[in-house]
Amino acid sequence: MFKNAKYIALSVCVVPLIIMAGAWLQVHSKTPQTAEQVEKLINSELPSGASKSQVKAFLDIHGITHSEYVDYEVTHPELETDLQNKKLEGKTHRIKHYIFASTPNRARMSIFRSDIQITFYFDSADNLVDYLMREVEDGP
């Protein structure tokens, strides 16, 4: 009986420590937590016309998962609605490539996963034209 009491007491002490460590890691993670933080990071660390290597380095440093550098024409741009976004108005003729990135949106407390998706658009010289960001929630 005494052995079981030791294990119960140990569990009661260890479980809260594990929960606190997980919460601390989430708060102090290098991955941005909210859409506002992502937007702020992009605007402060990626200059207009940044190269594809600068964008990839930015994503890697901040732990944001991303695709490879993709030729836009391969993805059938006539089916893409992103190019109709007002933010890209007047720039769409320059877009030749893109990198798609995604990071969890930790600001939304939900039983469903919520992500921040960012598409970085590049010209034929591999320089950043602009980006679009959106929040997406998986689930009903």
Image (spheres, rainbow, N blue to C red):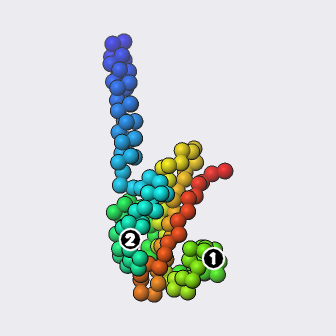
The one nearer the camera, 74 or 99, is 99
In the displayed structure, would residue 34 be above or below residue 67? above
Mark 2 or mark 1, which is nearer the start of the sequence?
Answer: 2
Residue drawn 41% across and 79% down?
Answer: 49
| Crowdedness near tag 1: few (<14), some (14–19) or many (≥20) residues, C-alpha within 10 Å | few
In the displayed structure, would residue 31 be above or below residue 118? above
The one nearer the camera, 18 or 96, is 96
Mark 1 falls on what kind of element?
A: helix
**Numbered disc total:** 2
Spot occupied by residue 120 in the image (x, y as percentages of width and height): 48, 73
Q: Which residue lies most toward the top here? A: 1
The image quadrant that residue 65 belongs to is bottom left
Quadrant where the image shows the N terminus: top left
Looking at the image, can residue 73 be seen?
Answer: no
Residue drawn 37% across and 36% down?
Answer: 20
Q: Which residue lies most toward the right here? A: 140
The image quadrant that residue 50 belongs to is bottom left
Residue drawn 38% across and 66% down?
Answer: 44
What number is the disc on residue 84?
Answer: 1
Badge 1 amino acid? Gln
In the displayed structure, would residue 95 be above or below residue 30? below
Mark 2 falls on what kind of element?
A: loop
Residue drawn 52% across and 56% down?
Answer: 115
Badge 2 amino acid? Leu
The one nearer the camera, 3 or 96, is 96
Spot occupied by residue 117 in the image (x, y as percentages of width and height): 52, 63
Spot occupied by residue 70 in the image (x, y as percentages of width and height): 48, 78
Looking at the image, can residue 140 be seen?
Answer: yes
Give how far apart the Cα atoms at labels 1 and 2 are.
23 Å
Spot occupied by residue 128 in the image (x, y as percentages of width and height): 44, 78
For this view, does 24 lie left or right of residue 132?
Answer: left
Q: Which residue is mark 2?
A: 46
